[in-house]
Image (cartoon, rainbow, N blue to C red):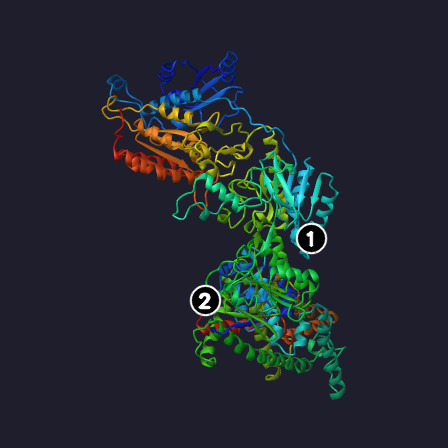
């Protein structure tokens, strides 16, 4: 593309009052660009003015106006490169003239005074002009063939609901179910919790209707007694090999080497060739992940609805409850099976169980935690099963001892209706023991609502074992990905396979694979059916993004994808290992094979690459590096007391919006910082920091999302990887005789707008205390 | 309290309380708002939260002998503020009704008093009693205690139903009621003391037995509280009920005094009624009668206007009786003065029936609170609970 540049300065929203527009124009002129002004660029007249410019041949526009986060649709011009220089939120609004006064006429002629705010605006203009020189218009990545079929793993209520929803939307669906019939866990229930208004009584399980609907739907193919041996390829062209459970086949997915096999006896890392040999030995009989099954079936996207299994109660922790030792102490799942068979009878002697105690929390000590994997569902199930006792026996009694009774949403109605039953007794309480006695069981509890230590006689005791997601035990999806067949690090979420639970429900760490139902969190049938719709829509969204060559969530519609300059690749594998989404599969030599539709365009690979050979059309090492270099760093040659220059690399997902909100609230921060938005802190390549410091900037900070166990990073690992890299850069700084404190990373949440100015100011102050960068002026 | 309490819910009890007006008890989720807003609950072991869980768990033994259910004056503040609509005020009223029938022997009669289906029988008893005893006396003793054709110019109720006949029936009835109360109270006092000791509601928990002198002193102190309706006036929601209640209470006292004086006048000084309207005792009688009618009417109106409060049979039957008593008493006098002989005699007969009901059924009805609440309040005063 032959770029024809144009620079446009908006004078509205306080920009012209605060800044010297003519001085800005001359900055543009210094770079050989003519800047034009408009009173309100986003007005219809302003847009017409820009359109006319485009009609006259301009195709690369630098718009000095508001933040790129607003008016993005107004300033989108197809076929043009547009850069938004953020003068409004980034300069004017957060640096009001009463706090950052303009120069007086006297100072202007004096020579040694400077206007920090004007300097900031001019730098941002330079940076914008530098960037547009280095970026290109993106072109979409399109697969040769795109399958629009959806694979649903799991034939339970969630899987079948997802399949029905997707089929209704016009997509062909295949359900794989490892058991020999559809239905899943719900097949074992006597009754189920309500799924609709008025939510106040038990209903017959909805599963039979679902099965009928699935069997009647011509778009749905059902494969029972089947599991996924491997899922290779990428969204839009997943190649799936099915097998019977227990079978061993060539296309069973290979596993990566465990960490202890990656090093030799002395603990040294093995070279790529040896590793590959070991890997082949380790996975003997299984084809490598890059070998595609010629008979595999193609799918566009996957809904993972593999469900849950009842938690096993093992070990001494539950000895006081008699589980395992006393046959009449059972789990909720076991009790459900008894109830399904007929009237509730004691397992020990088959006599009617007319008094049943439901224990929601193991109790004993002061600890008030519930059984692991328990939650709202186990609370509701205890109420459901308490009702069974009352259904079966006129004189039946049910006792529920809980530490937490969770009946969210309209399930409150169900709770209320159960509470109304005169034979059901609920209390918070700490269960001390379950023992045999008085022809049955004796349960002792303390700290109850009745205010004292009490005993209850019972025929049976039911323990609220939780719902364990099957992904805790098994990879299930069996992805032929270099990072392994399972979701990574899901032990952080106790085996649930979400990637960013709050922000992106259904998203897993693997693009194109969407989780729904109990594999995501424990949920009721009703919630699972709703969840299924969400995941089905996500799968459809994925297919319709892939077939247009654009990114799925969270950078929906992004047309760029990482481009590798392979000639300079040193096979260090960092990109393959660090990609949060497992988008890269390296070959036997260690050369990465990109799978663009698996990619979410976070740029973590770009940040990782020591050779700097990875970049995007509009976001690359050079584009950001040039912006850094475009910043003017005044030295003592310019002013007797030159201002500090601090670079801030700001995550555009949460941190950049936070700064915009701060500006909107007229909160101000130091005018000596220069901020550059980045896709994710994971995409920050240390070369930018080195460049900034070597050109005399006094400090660099990274502003991004929270990382760690309860991370908020949109790309799971970005801010965490950045923090690791920042630790390493410290060593490099020391060798250059620069203080490690000159580089820092801060965490902000999107609602931290009131804190972020302080964070920036504190850092600038700490840099001022260190004094100017000794490299300044060289 | 290291021994565990064996919980054995009595579902029948729960169903009974629900029938007696505590139908919302199971809605309670134990937030204790009721105990917090209750204006008259003590600070230590406040009610009615613990009574609510005990009721919904069917723990009869925790409630019947629990003095706290009687400390409650059914202010209704708890019911108004209850976030779940469990109406603790009405639940406690229902539990009280149940407790009354537990302490009053024979229990069968207690059941009947609380069962609307038994009302015709209960009303027939005094009518039959008066007629049969009167007839028998006439026949056996040759007297004219029951005289359907009383002669003379003046209308004298005593000529219709002789005071001898009335007293021969009513005095034993009164003594019967006192006896039933005495039997009930003996157990009641022992129970509330045991309950208070167990729940730690008294600072006298080192004593197995109640000290009679201390208790009497406490009773005397409490009587002034009751007469002034001090507790009732602390209520928020049902405060307006305090005045009519006070009118009814004082009218009963006034009428009791009047009856006693005329009793003495009749049997000691041989002065027969009817007495002159100028007699100061008569003034007191008329004042009491008017207060009874107005007080009970107000209470009926207030119950009718309070849609959010449960009013069950136990409430209506007592209010009906009290109102009926006042109205028939007054009407009997007015018709007598107005010279409507036949009407007057008939109304007097109804009045006598009501009076008998009042005497006989008090230990089984809501009116028993007169005794149980007084004793419970006295015990509370005695126990030194804060």
Mark 1 touching mark 2, by CB under 8 A? no
- From this view, report whether residue A456 is shown above or below residue A284: below
- From this view, report whether residue B30 is shown above or below residue A459: above
Query: Whole-percent x and y of residue A638?
Result: 25, 21
Residue shown at 44%/76% (left/top)? B204
Image quarter in which the C terminus of chain A is found? top left
Query: Whole-percent x and y of residue A381?
Result: 61, 57
Asked which quadrant contains residue A685, the reply is top left
Which of the labelled discs sits on residue A321, or is there none? none
Q: The residue tagged with tag 2: helix, strand or loop?
A: loop
Residue B362 visible, this orientation: no
Q: Closest to the observer: A272 or B187?
A: A272
Q: Closest to the observer: A654 or A456?
A: A654
Query: Whole-percent x and y of residue B334?
Result: 67, 68
- Mark 2 — residue? B44
- Mark 1 — residue? A205
- From this view, report whether residue B321 is shown above or below residue A25: below
Q: Chain of mark 2?
A: B
A112 horizontally vs A588: left or right:
left
Q: The residue tagged with tag 1: helix, strand or loop?
A: loop
Q: Chain of mark 1?
A: A
Q: Nearer the viewer, mark 1 or mark 2?
A: 1
B193 horizontally vs A246: left or right:
left
Alpha carbons under labels 1 and 2: distance apart:
49 Å
Residue A84 visible, this orientation: yes
Q: Residue furthest top?
A: A56
Query: Whole-percent x and y of residue A679?
Result: 46, 32
Number of labels in the image equals: 2
Graded by Cα atoms within 10 Å as few (under 14), some (14 to 19) or many (20 or more), the crowding at tag 1 reads: some
Asked which quadrant contains residue A144, the reply is top right
């Amino acid at each position: 593309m032959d770029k024809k540049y144009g620079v446009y300065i908006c004078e509205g929203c306080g920009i012209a009052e605060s800044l010297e527009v003519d001085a800005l124009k001359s900055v543009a002129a210094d770079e050989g660009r003519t800047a034009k002004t408009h009173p309100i660029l986003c007005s219809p007249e302003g847009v017409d003015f820009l359109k006319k410019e485009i009609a006259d041949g301009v195709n690369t526009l630098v718009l000095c106006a508001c933040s790129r986060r607003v008016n993005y649709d107004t300033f989108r011009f197809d076929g043009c490169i547009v850069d938004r220089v953020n003068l409004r939120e980034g300069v004017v609004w957060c640096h009001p003239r009463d706090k950052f006064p303009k120069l007086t006429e006297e100072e202007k002629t004096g020579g040694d005074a400077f206007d920090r705010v004007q300097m900031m605006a001019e730098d941002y203009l330079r940076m914008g002009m530098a960037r547009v020189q280095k970026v290109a218009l993106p072109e979409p990545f399109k697969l040769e063939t795109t399958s629009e079929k959806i694979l649903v793993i799991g034939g339970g209520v969630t899987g079948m609901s997802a399949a029905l929803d997707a089929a209704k939307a016009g997509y062909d669906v295949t359900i794989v179910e490892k058991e020999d019939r559809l239905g899943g866990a719900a097949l074992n229930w006597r009754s189920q919790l309500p799924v609709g208004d008025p939510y106040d009584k038990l209903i017959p399980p909805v599963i039979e209707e679902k099965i009928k609907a699935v069997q009647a739907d011509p778009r749905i193919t059902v494969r029972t007694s089947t599991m996924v041996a491997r899922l290779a390829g990428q969204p839009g062209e997943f190649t799936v090999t099915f097998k019977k459970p227990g079978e061993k086949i060539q296309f069973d997915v290979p596993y990566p080497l465990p960490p202890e096999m990656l090093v030799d006896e002395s603990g040294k890392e093995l070279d790529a060739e040896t590793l590959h040999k070991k890997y082949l030995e380790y996975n003997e009989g299984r084809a490598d992940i890059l070998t595609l099954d010629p008979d595999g079936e193609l799918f566009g996207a996957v809904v993972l609805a593999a469900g849950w299994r009842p938690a096993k109660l093992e070990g001494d922790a539950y000895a006081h409850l008699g589980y395992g030792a006393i046959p009449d102490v059972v789990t909720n799942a076991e009790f459900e099976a008894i109830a399904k068979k007929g009237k509730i009878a004691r397992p020990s002697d088959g006599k009617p169980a007319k008094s049943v105690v439901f224990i929601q929390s193991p109790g004993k000590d002061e600890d008030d935690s519930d059984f692991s994997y328990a939650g709202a569902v186990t609370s509701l199930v205890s109420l459901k099963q308490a009702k069974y006792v009352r259904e079966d026996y006129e004189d039946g009694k049910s006792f529920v001892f809980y530490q937490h009774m969770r009946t969210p949403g309209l399930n409150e109605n169900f709770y209320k209706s159960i509470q109304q039953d005169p034979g059901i007794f609920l209390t918070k309480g700490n269960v001390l023991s379950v023992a045999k006695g008085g022809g049955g069981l004796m349960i002792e509890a303390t700290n109850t609502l009745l205010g004292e230590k009490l005993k209850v006689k019972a025929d049976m005791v039911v323990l609220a074992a939780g719902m364990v997601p099957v992904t805790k035990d098994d990879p299930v999806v069996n992805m032929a990905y270099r990072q392994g067949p399972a979701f990574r690090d899901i032990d952080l979420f106790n085996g649930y396979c979400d990637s960013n639970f709050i922000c992106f429900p259904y998203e897993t760490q693997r693009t194109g694979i969407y989780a729904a139902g109990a594999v995501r969190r424990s949920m009721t049938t009703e919630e699972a059916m709703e969840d299924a719709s969400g995941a089905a829509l996500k799968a459809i969204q994925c297919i319709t993004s892939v077939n247009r060559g654009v990114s799925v969530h969270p950078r929906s519609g992004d047309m760029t994808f990482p481009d590798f300059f392979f000639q300079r690749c040193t096979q260090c594998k960092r990109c393959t290992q660090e990609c949060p989404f497992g988008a890269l599969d390296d070959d036997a030599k260690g050369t990465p094979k990109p799978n663009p539709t698996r990619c979410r365009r976070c740029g973590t690979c770009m940040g990782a690459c020591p050779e700097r050979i990875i970049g995007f059309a509009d976001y690359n090492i050079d584009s950001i590096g040039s912006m850094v270099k475009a910043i003017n760093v005044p030295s003592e040659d310019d002013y007797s007391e030159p201002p500090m220059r601090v670079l801030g690399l700001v995550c555009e997902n949460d941190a950049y919006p936070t700064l915009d909100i701060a500006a909107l609230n007229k909160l101000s921060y130091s005018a000596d910082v220069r901020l550059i938005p980045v896709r994710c802190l994971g995409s920050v390549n240390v070369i930018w920091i080195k460049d900034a410091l070597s050109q005399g900037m006094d400090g660099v900070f990274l502003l991004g999302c929270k990382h760690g166990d309860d991370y908020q990073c949109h790309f799971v690992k970005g801010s965490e990887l950045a923090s690791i890299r920042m630790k390493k850069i410290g060593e490099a700084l020391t060798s250059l005789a620069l203080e490690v404190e000159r580089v820092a990373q801060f965490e902000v949440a999107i609602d931290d707008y009131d804190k972020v100015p302080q964070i920036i100011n504190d850092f600038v102050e700490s840099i001022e205390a260190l004094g100017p960068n000794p490299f300044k002026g060289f | 309290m290291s021994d565990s309490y064996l919980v054995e819910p009595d579902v029948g009890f729960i169903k009974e309380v629900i029938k007696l007006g505590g139908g919302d008890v199971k809605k309670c989720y134990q937030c204790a708002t009721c105990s917090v807003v209750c204006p008259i609950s003590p600070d230590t072991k406040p009610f009615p939260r613990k009574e609510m869980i005990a009721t919904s768990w069917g723990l009869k033994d925790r409630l019947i002998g629990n003095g706290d259910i009687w400390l409650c004056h059914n202010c209704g503040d708890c019911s108004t503020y209850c976030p779940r609509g469990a109406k603790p005020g009405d639940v406690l009223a229902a539990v009280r009704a149940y407790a009354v029938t537990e302490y009053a022997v024979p229990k069968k009669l207690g059941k009947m008093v609380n069962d609307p289906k038994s009302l015709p029988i209960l009303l027939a008893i005094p009518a039959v009693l008066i007629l049969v005893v009167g007839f028998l006396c006439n026949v056996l003793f040759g007297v004219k205690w029951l005289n359907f054709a009383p002669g003379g110019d003046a209308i004298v109720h005593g000529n219709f139903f002789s005071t001898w006949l009335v007293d021969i029936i009513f005095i034993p009835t009164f003594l019967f009621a006192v006896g039933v109360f005495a039997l009930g109270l003996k157990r009641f006092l022992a129970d509330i003391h045991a309950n208070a000791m167990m729940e730690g509601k008294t600072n006298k928990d080192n004593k197995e037995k109640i000290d009679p002198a201390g208790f009497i002193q406490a009773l005397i102190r409490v009587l002034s509280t009751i007469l002034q309706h001090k507790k009732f006036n602390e209520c928020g929601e049902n405060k307006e009920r305090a005045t009519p209640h006070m009118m009814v209470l004082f009218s009963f006292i006034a009428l009791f005094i009047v009856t006693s004086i005329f009793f003495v006048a009749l049997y000691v000084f041989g002065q027969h009624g009817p007495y002159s309207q100028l007699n100061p005792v008569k003034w007191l009688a008329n004042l009491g009668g008017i207060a009874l009618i107005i007080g009970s009417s107000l209470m009926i109106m207030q119950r009718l206007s309070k849609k959010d409060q449960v009013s069950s049979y136990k409430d209506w039957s007592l209010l009906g009786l009290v109102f009926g008593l006042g109205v028939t008493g007054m009407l009997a006098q007015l018709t007598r003065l107005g010279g409507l002989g036949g009407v007057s005699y008939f109304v007097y007969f109804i009045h006598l029936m009501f009076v008998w009901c009042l005497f006989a059924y008090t230990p089984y009805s809501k009116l028993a609170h007169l005794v149980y609440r007084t004793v419970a309040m006295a015990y509370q005063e005695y126990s030194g609970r804060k």
